[in-house]
Amino acid sequence: MLTDPIQEFPDNVYPIIFSAKRLNPDNFWQSHQKFGSMSLPNQLKNQHLLWRAGFGPAVEQLPDLSQFTPQQFYNALVKASSKKPDYINVADNYLQGLMMGIDQVGRVQKKDLTPDEKKEIQRKSREGVRNLNLYWLHEMVNSSAQLREKMAFFWHGHFACRNLNVFYQQGLLNVIRQNALGNFGTLLKEVSKTAAMLNFLNNQQNRKGHPNENFAREVMELFTLGRGNYTEQDVKEAARAFTGWSANARGEFIFRQNQHDTDSKTVLGKTGNLDGDDVLDILLDQKQTAHFITKKIYVFFVNEQPDVQRIDWLTERFHKSDYDISKLMADIFTSDWFYDEKNVGSKIKSPIELIAGIQRMLPMKLENEESLIVLQRILGQMLFYPPNVAGWPGGKTWIDSSSLMMRMRIPQLINDEDELNVRPKDDDDQMMGRENTTPSAAPPKKVVFRGSKPINASVDWNQYTNYFDKTQREKLVNSIAGILLQTKTGVDGSVITSYADQSNREEFIKTATIQIMSTPEYQLC
Amino acid sequence: MLIKRKEFIQVGSLATASLMLPKFLKAFEGRPMVPAGNKVVVIVQLSGGNDGLNTIIPVRNDLYYKARPRLGIESTKALSITDEAGLHPSLTGFKELYDDGSLGIINSVGYPNPDRSHFRSMDIWQTASQSNEYLSSGWVGRYLDAQCKGCDKPTQAIEIDDVLSLSMKGEHMKGIAVKDPRRLYGTANEKFFRDVMKNHGGDTGEETVDYLYKTMSETLSSADYIFRQSKLHPTNAEYPKTELGNSLKTIASLIFSDINTKVYYVSLGSFDTHINQEFQQARLFTQLNDAVKAFTADMKTNGRFEDVLLFTFSEFGRRVSQNASGGTDHGTANNMFLVSGGLKQKGLINEMPDLNDLNEGDLKHKVDFKNVYATILKKWLSADDQQILHGKYEMMNFI
């Protein structure tokens, strides 16, 4: 039996970046409304920073939000993310043993596995990817290395990859988390050498005399230059340079010399007996690569509407720094313009940001963890299952009638024992036909999917409600909205009040919080 | 302290959202049905990669039986339609449609450089992209973009599901997903949503806020609209009690109403028959057959069959040769069914696939699916096919 990695964590281990100084919060909502052309209050700026450079403010951080400047907060975020992350290994012993065995006795033996063994490996591997998903989501909620996990989340969408082999996925995630704040060139090279990516983009089939251009094309189109900045001929030549790049069953990079095309190639004007690393270096030399990455980072972290001047300025510095990701992020998060009114509250949270953000503010234990997977699927962002190699398009594409209504129901679902009576679409890549294994003459049974149960969340409200201890009753709604919402215009306090439970103060805080989280405004950060 | 959280107020329900319903129904009582002529499309997505060769069976082709010693369907069992082709034995209703001239079959539909991964190939079909191009909008969605500028409700394209497919998402407009008009979003929070919306003071100048409120407002008004329309002339025909049966019944009721919907979308699956194909495909085809049979009979009875074009598609067909586990693996080109009382070409519209001319064991495509889309967009929906499909595709003649 596979142990659930999530349950190995002690309850509610939360980072406190600063020593907690409990202070009575301001009536933030009013100052929020008043800020006008003046610089925004620190609390709002810090919340902005925590939503963009992490997965939102955690309940432990509430007292600190108005006590420190964004610069101090950012420094703390950097410090908390400086440690090299541990390799996440969710594969169980059976699978590990099997993979080691395959590796030792050679690849031929893999074919000798019985159909049942193969099926069992596939099942365990799929289960492993699911556990990896939950484990990483748990890190996003609970880790103090918020900046690292957020950057890794960005790279997870940039280097989008579907692969049902849990070892391959673990390897890729490890590369991404380790290099998330490091050097982009190193990250690019290491990702390009993961079994997950080589396999996903068919480079195992890219051989001398029989090129498969998929890998070379996507490296240029999606990982470095962007469409329109290279020719078809560049793709063809680069593909030849990547011949022989492969991986073994354990997921380690292997260069198969005998499959490598050693003839001369010309990529973006550079000629020679190029290999894969040479091509990646040529791509990194191009300032367009710095521009492509910087623009994507700007759109992801700052504003969906690209600002050409800012992006050019950042690009210049990113390229000069030889692709130092930490410096680029510092340039962004410590600039004044990052905290401009137009950038605050303008971004639609991705489903993962929404789900993680709620859990950071309301620490909870979930009896039915499968619901976290189901929610990801319904809302259109399941970790490790990007829609294609281009990743999640983001922005307004997150929102349609069904997904918006579902998003606004989540707080209520956490809150009561309603069934999650919405069924995600089947994913045949995940199912691999397994639904169909037992023929029977009986009429098809109603499919009960595993998430179709109450979420059964137990929220630990103590710290949250304590935070409002000294807030006057009539200021509560504004104060709660102030920590939950980033938009300039708020929701109508009277509506929230009228739907909140007025029977006592604690219930009022809880229900008002749930209601505010159920608004369109809460979808933004 | 952990608090078990159940103690919350239940606010409203969709039942109460329809409090105004009786009055509304009255207003429409006895109103005539929409006159004939309003063309609609019903898209049936066969998810998972349906095995086309066991759908339209090449009963005279030795290569077929050689490649499928176990899975090949004998010509005596297939429902014969021409000398060389027979339908899967479960598709009795389709055979009747064939006999009566309302079934068209396009063979060898696909696209250049086929992708054998489900999600990628489905992406290509749903976005109508080239195989090396990644679009984040779907073709029906882009039809909405072109057709529906300034529409106040996204009900021109409705998917009968909980979750909206990429097909239905345009760059500006998106269709709406509805599983059951009576239980639109299953939300106990609907009254709260309406109050939040009522108290929201119009445009805020914050673009994304306005976008979310607009979507919310369209959703809530569409929910009412669809529910009311579904009650105008609900069909009283018998439909099979399957999910697809229910979905087509809902679609029929909406077609009989005066809703502005032009495209309906529904999925059936999974056709990913790597193992036990015989059982699995027959089970799904029985569902498909019974539901489509009831639906077409209903359309005929109500004089709307000429206005309805139903078609099926799947993200790919399957390999010509069977595999070792009683199934077939992912393939490429595939066939599509066209069902309508208004077809100009009937039966086999093009020749059966050439099993002599394979590409590494897979069928070669002869018709790009985008030609089918273009034809439907232009000839059936009178839309700008070139703008929607980002290019010019030759028209076909089936409508």
Image (cartoon, rainbow, N blue to C red):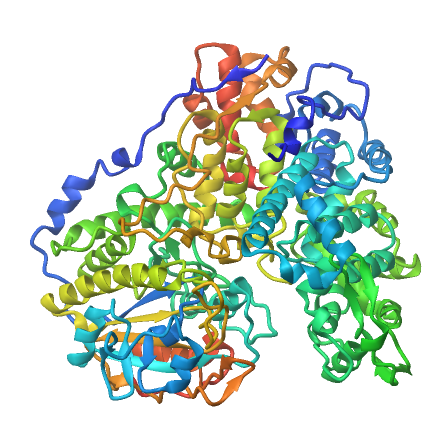
| Residue B166 on image: x %, y % | 47, 60
Residue A153 appears in the rendering = yes
Q: Residue at x 63, y 43 (%)?
A: A133
Q: Residue at x 36, y 45 (%)?
A: A447
Question: Which part of the image, by quadrant, shows the N terminus of chain B?
Answer: top right
| Vertical relation: A302 (above or below) B342 | above
Q: In the shown orientation, is residue B130 left or right of residue B271?
A: right
Q: Quadrant of residue A330?
A: top right
Residue B381 appears in the rendering = no
B108 and A323: which one is in front?
Answer: B108
| Residue B273 on image: x %, y % | 43, 62
Q: In the shown orientation, is residue A137 left or right of residue A502?
A: right
| Vertical relation: A370 (above or below) B96 | above
Q: Residue at x 42, y 48 (%)?
A: A402
Question: Which part of the image, by quadrant, shows the C terminus of chain B?
Answer: bottom left
Q: Quadrant of residue A73?
A: top right
| Vertical relation: A341 (above or below) B9 | below
| Residue B118 on image: x %, y % | 51, 64
| Residue B43 on image: x %, y % | 34, 66
B251 and A133: which one is in front?
Answer: A133
